[in-house]
Image (cartoon, rainbow, N blue to C red):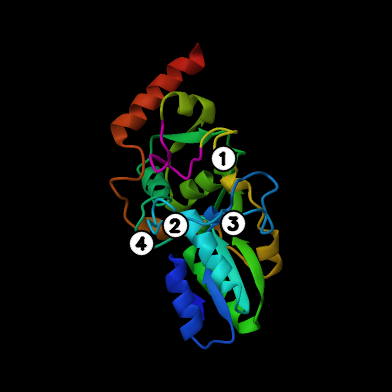
Amino acid sequence: MIDVAGYLPRVVRQTVELVDAPYYLFVSTLSVYAAFSDTTNEDSPVLGDTDSEEIMEHYGELKAMCERVVQERPGAIVRPGLIVGPHDPTGRFTYWPHRIARGGDVLAPGPPDEPVALIDARDLGAWMVRLCEDGTHGVFNAIDLTTWGELLEACVRGTGSDARLVWTPSEWLAEQGVGEWMELPLWTGPAGSEHAGLHRVSNERALAAGLRSRPLEETARDTLEGAKTTDDAGLGPEREAELLASWQLASRA
């Protein structure tokens, strides 16, 4: 059994007790970790309990509590990062192929060798099915680790765009009040910010268990064709133009 919709521990408890399955795979999240760093792996501390059932406010704590329930059953816990690809309703990764496809100067959070983590939903789904078929047990961070440079250049190639990436230091973006994660999708701020280590967690255990990712160009192309942008994810054209102009002046000073 694959449980993709467990958010509240009491509901997961009911599922665990009612479903007679020899193998239980629970889809969790990287948000369960108490802190992020270069050394964060599946054995790192996770968040404690909460009395609240407000999922959006206590998402990480509730998922960690759900994990503690499903650990009573044989199976696996999969902790994906940002899940992307066609039909993604969030608009987060989707912003990048759509924006780059429009061409022109594109504000990119630098430096280009900064890590970034995501996973194509199709690769994640296929791999989880194989875990079930093989009866693989354990906890796994399900992410594809790449860099901002590799990701955005793949978007350029995958969309056939003539866009020019303008690499802008994360520290400067933070000074301009650019919002992390949603206003500038996937960006988690400069080094030292609360979630900067989100893109640095280890995926070695998942790779050893057979997780494989398709080329980023394919994900970018298919997302452009099969997912729509949203109003609450991504820089608006005027905001991006203002930032690009300000950075051009600042970089000349």
SS at badge 2? loop
In the image, is residue 93 above or below residue 191? below
Kindly identify which residue carries mark 3: 144
Does residue 243 appear to the left or right of 216 in the view shown? left
Disc assigned to residue 236 = none
Instruction: Work out whether mark 4 precedes mark 1 in sequence or the reverse, and give the earlier one.
Output: 1
Instruction: Work out whether mark 4 precedes mark 2 in sequence or the reverse, and give the earlier one.
Output: 2
Amino acid of disc 2: Asp
Task: Give the mark toward the camera: 4 or 2.
Answer: 2
Instruction: Work out whether mark 1 precedes mark 3 in sequence or the reverse, and give the earlier one.
Output: 3
Amino acid of disc 4: Gly
CA distance for labels 2 and 3: 33 Å
Task: Give the mark toward the camera: 2 or 1.
Answer: 2
Disc assigned to residue 196 = 1
Residue 79: give x, y in percent of width and height: 56, 62
* Front residue of this view, candidates 158 and 115: 115
Task: Give the mark toward the camera: 1 or 3.
Answer: 1
Is 179 part of what is drawn in magenta? yes
SS at badge 1? helix
Q: Residues within 10 Å of mark 4 (few under 14, many from 20)?
A: few
Where residue 183 sits, quadrant-wise, is: top left
* Residue range highlighted in magenta: 178-188
Amino acid of disc 3: Asp
